[in-house]
C-alpha cells in the first residue's frame, strides 16, 4: 500500500459511514407517520371540494331555545271555512260548463251559465274564492234544481286535527304553537291551536285539538296522517347545537369543530334537549363553527387514521 492509498482509506470510510447514517435517518422518518404530521395530530384536513362532495354542512355555536313538547298524532283536513258549495241562484237549464274536477279557479271566474226557467234569461254562476274544483255535478242541458253544482276548495291553509287523550287535554291551550311533521316525507311546518273540542270522542276516548297550518306550498294533503309536537314551554339557553351533529366516539359525546388546521373532534357535555337542539354545558364556546350534517363522515375518517397509526 502506498502513501496515497493510506490517505484515501480513512476518507472513504468516513464518507461511507456518514452516508449510511443519513440514509438510515431518512428511512426512520419515512416509517414514522408522526415525524412530519405531528402538528396535524387530532385534526382532519379536507379540501372545499371534499367538504362539498361529502355533503358536510356547517353552523356556528350560539344561543337558542330548548322546547318541552307533547308528541301527538293527527290527520290533515280541508279548512272548512275555505270551502264553497256552488248552486244556481235561480232554477233553470245549464247552458254551458266551463270547469272540471281538478281545475284551478280564481275568485269571480265563470263556472257555468244557466237559463232561468221563469225569465228565460241566461245568467252566470261564478266562483266566490280562489281554489280547486273538487266536486262537479253539472252537465249541459240538465236542470239545476236545488242541488250543489260544484265544490271549490282553497288549500292555501289546512286544518290538522290532533287526538289528545284525557291525561293530556289540560296541556293544550288556544294559540299554542305546534310543530307538524309528515309521516311520509321530510316536510315540516308550524301552526297554532285554533280550536279545542268541548266534547270527547266516545269511540277512542280522545279529544280533538285543531291546528291551522299554512299550505301555500301544497305539501299537506287532506286525509294524510302526521306527527305533531305541541310546545308546552321554551327555555332560553346560551349555548346550543343541532342534535344531529353529535357523534359517539369510544363512549364519549363528540362533535367536530372547524379550526385553522382542519376539523377537530371535541368532547362535550350536553344538558337539556328537545330532540332537535341540545344544550351544551361544556366543551364549546359561542361563535365556534361545527359540523351539523354528515359529521359521521369525519368520524369514519378519524377511524381510518387511528387504524393506520396503529400499524
Image (cartoon, rainbow, N blue to C red):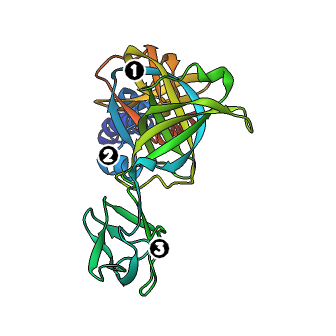
x then y, percent, for residue 205: 72, 32
- Residue at figure coordinates x 31%, y 36% from the top left: 7
Residue at (33%, 33%) from the top-left corner? 59
Q: Which residue is mark 3?
A: 145
84 lies above or below 79? below
Q: Quadrant location of the N terminus?
A: top left
Residue 141 percent across, percent down from the top left: 43, 87
Determine which of the numbered discs, if any, sits on residue 47 in the image: 2
Point out residue 131 in the picture as x, y percentages from the top left corner. Answer: 35, 61
Q: Is residue 168 above or below residue 235?
A: below
Q: Is residue 43 at least partly visible in the picture?
A: yes
Residue 308 shown left or right of residue 286 in the figure: right
SS assignment at label 1: strand
Nearer the observer, 209 or 37:
209
Name the N-terminal-most of marks 3 and 1: 1
Q: Nearest to the eye among marks 2 and 3: give it.
A: 3
Q: Which residue is mark 1?
A: 65
Q: Secondary structure at mark 2?
A: loop
Q: Residue at x 60, y 23 (%)?
A: 169
| Mark number, residue 290 | none
Q: Is residue 267 visible?
A: no
Viewer-nearest residue: 69 or 11: 69
Count neighbours of disc 2 (C-alpha within 10 A) and say few if under 14, some if 14 to 19, many if 20 or more: few
Few, some or many C-alpha atoms within 10 Å of disc 3 (few <14, some 14-19, many ≥20)? Answer: some
Amino acid at each position: 500500500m502506498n502513501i496515497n492509498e493510506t490517505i484515501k482509506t480513512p476518507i472513504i470510510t468516513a464518507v461511507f459511514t456518514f452516508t449510511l447514517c443519513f440514509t438510515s435517518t431518512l428511512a426512520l422518518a419515512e416509517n414514522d407517520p408522526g415525524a412530519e404530521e405531528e402538528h396535524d395530530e387530532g385534526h382532519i384536513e379536507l379540501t372545499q371540494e371534499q367538504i362539498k362532495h361529502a355533503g358536510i354542512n356547517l353552523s356556528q355555536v350560539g344561543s337558542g331555545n330548548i322546547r318541552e313538547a307533547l308528541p301527538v298524532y293527527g290527520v290533515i283536513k280541508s279548512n272548512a271555512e275555505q270551502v264553497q258549495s256552488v248552486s244556481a241562484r235561480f232554477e233553470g237549464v245549464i247552458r254551458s260548463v266551463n270547469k272540471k274536477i281538478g281545475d284551478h279557479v280564481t275568485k269571480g271566474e265563470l263556472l257555468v251559465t244557466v237559463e232561468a226557467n221563469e225569465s228565460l234569461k241566461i245568467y252566470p254562476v261564478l266562483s266566490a274564492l280562489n281554489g280547486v274544483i273538487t266536486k262537479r255535478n253539472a252537465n249541459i242541458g240538465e236542470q239545476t234544481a236545488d242541488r250543489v253544482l260544484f265544490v271549490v276548495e282553497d288549500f292555501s291553509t289546512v286544518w290538522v286535527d290532533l287526538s289528545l287523550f284525557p291525561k293530556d287535554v289540560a296541556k293544550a291551550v288556544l294559540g299554542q304553537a305546534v310543530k307538524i311533521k309528515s309521516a311520509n316525507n321530510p316536510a315540516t311546518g308550524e301552526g297554532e291551536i285554533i280550536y279545542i273540542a268541548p266534547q270527547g270522542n266516545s269511540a277512542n276516548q280522545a279529544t280533538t285539538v285543531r291546528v291551522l297550518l299554512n299550505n301555500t306550498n301544497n305539501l299537506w294533503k287532506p286525509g294524510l296522517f302526521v306527527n305533531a309536537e305541541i310546545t308546552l314551554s321554551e327555555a332560553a339557553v346560551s349555548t346550543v347545537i343541532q342534535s344531529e351533529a353529535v357523534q359517539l366516539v369510544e363512549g364519549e359525546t363528540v362533535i367536530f369543530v372547524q379550526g385553522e388546521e382542519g376539523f377537530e373532534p371535541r368532547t362535550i357535555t350536553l344538558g337539556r334537549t328537545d330532540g332537535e337542539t341540545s344544550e351544551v354545558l361544556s366543551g364549546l364556546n359561542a361563535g365556534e363553527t361545527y359540523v351539523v350534517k354528515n359529521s359521521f363522515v369525519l368520524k369514519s375518517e378519524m377511524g381510518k387514521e387511528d387504524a393506520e397509526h396503529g400499524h
